[in-house]
Image (tube, grey):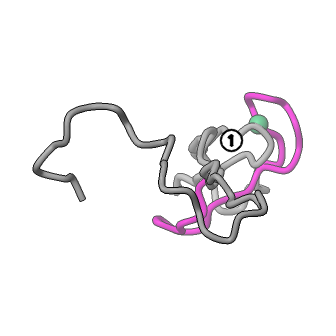
Amino acid sequence: MPTYEYACPKCGHAFEHFQSMRDAPLTRCPKCRKLGVKRLVGSGAGLIFKGSGFYITDYKKSKAPEKTGGETAPAAKPDQPAKPAAPVAAK
Ligand SMILES: [Zn+2]
């Protein structure tokens, strides 16, 4: 009897279930008790839901150049760190 891998898209719970091929696939998540678990066919199906697998692309809070009116930017850069100049700039 094969072991089937299941993943619940609702709560991200992934588990294996040992069952006969003739058995109906599971539909209910044993963790959150909701329907809709997906059986992962084959190994390495690449369809694995992980609980915290959703990555949100971080938007860097880029300081958008605001229209402050001036055509040329003032020479002063207030965002420069006021530390001694490091000869080796990390790139
Ligand atoms: Zn679940």
For the point 16% across and 43% down, the residue is: 86
> Can residue 65 be seen in this snapshot?
yes
Q: Is residue 4 left or right of 76 when viewed as pictured?
A: right
Q: Is residue 84 magenta?
A: no
Q: Where does the image place residue 63, in percent across and percent down from the top left?
A: 64, 52
| Number of on-image labels | 1
For the point 83% across and 41% down, the residue is: 28
The relative height of residue 86 versus residue 2 in the rendered view (above or below) is: above
Disc 1 under 8 Å from ligand 1? The reply is yes
Q: Name the residue under label 1.
A: 12
Residue 12 quadrant: top right
In which of the image's four quarters is ligand 1 placed?
Answer: top right
Q: 17 or 78: nearer the eye?
A: 78
The quadrant of the picture occupied by the C terminus is bottom left
Q: Where does the image place residue 20, in percent across and percent down from the top left?
A: 63, 55
Q: Does the magenta stretch include residue 29?
A: yes
Span highlighted in magenta in the image: 26-48
Q: Is residue 56 left or right of 33 when viewed as pictured?
A: left
